[in-house]
Amino acid sequence: MEFDQLLEERYSVRKFSNQKVEKEKIDKILEVARIAPTAVNYQPQRILVVEDQDNLAKLKECTRYHFYAPLAMILCYDKTVSWKDMHNRECGEVDVSIVATYMMLKLFDLGLGSTYVGSFDYKELIKQFNIPENYVPVMILPIGYPREDCVPGPMHDKRKPLNAIVSYEEYTQGEQ
């Protein structure tokens, strides 16, 4: 698939078939996560792969947005590794978001689907999966083959025009 086509056709999948995701595809997704850019290339991303039925049941204790996917990945960053800018702002969450974007594009290219889940019980997730205290969970990616009746959501094609999101030097024209 051409890259532009991939960008235009990818959508958030919220209905999954029961088909298991093959190990080879999981490995390809994780490789993309490994090579994605991060601030100062510190690579703070930490990914927990959840595919065992017992662990998928644990995930349901942490979020209602699991969508019964046969696979999920919990994306965290290690706060002892992530870069902090000169104002001590944490860049780990941005790094994980970039990594997740790469992963979602790759898995769509592999015929899989996912959606970004940021709504979860943070403390319960840490407890259920024994996540180390230096790891900060950012999101969950439920992953699998889209069910036959899965279609893009009603807001998928509703995009703002460029002039609503882009300014050319507008903010530099203020008082001197």
Image (tube, rainbow, N blue to C red):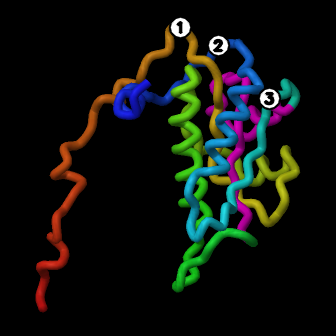
- In the picture, the quarter occupied by the C terminus is bottom left
Residue density around tag 1, few if under 14, some if 14–19, many if 20 or more, within 10 Å: few
Magenta-drawn segment? 55-79
Residue depicted at 83% across the width and 53% down the height: 131
Query: Mark 1 is on which residue type?
Result: Glu
Q: Which mark, by number, is residue 51?
A: 3
**Secondary element at image label 2:** loop
Point out residue 5 in the picture as x, y percentages from the top left corner. Answer: 36, 27
Q: What element carries label 3?
A: loop
Nearer-N-terminus badge (3/2): 2
Q: Residue tagged by mark 1?
A: 148
Q: Specify the quadrant of the image occupied by residue 100.
A: top right
Using residue 65 as the reference point, say whether residue 108 is left or right of it.
Answer: left
Which residue is denoted by mark 2 in the rendering? 17
Mark positioned earlier in the residue sequence (1 or 2): 2
Tell me which amino acid carries mark 2: Ser
Contact? badges 3 and 1 (CB < 8 Å): no
Please tell me whether residue 64 is drawn above or below residue 68 in the rendered image: below
Residue at x 16% of width, y 52% of height: 163
Residue lying at the far top in this picture: please name it: 148
Q: Is residue 51 above or below residue 132?
A: above
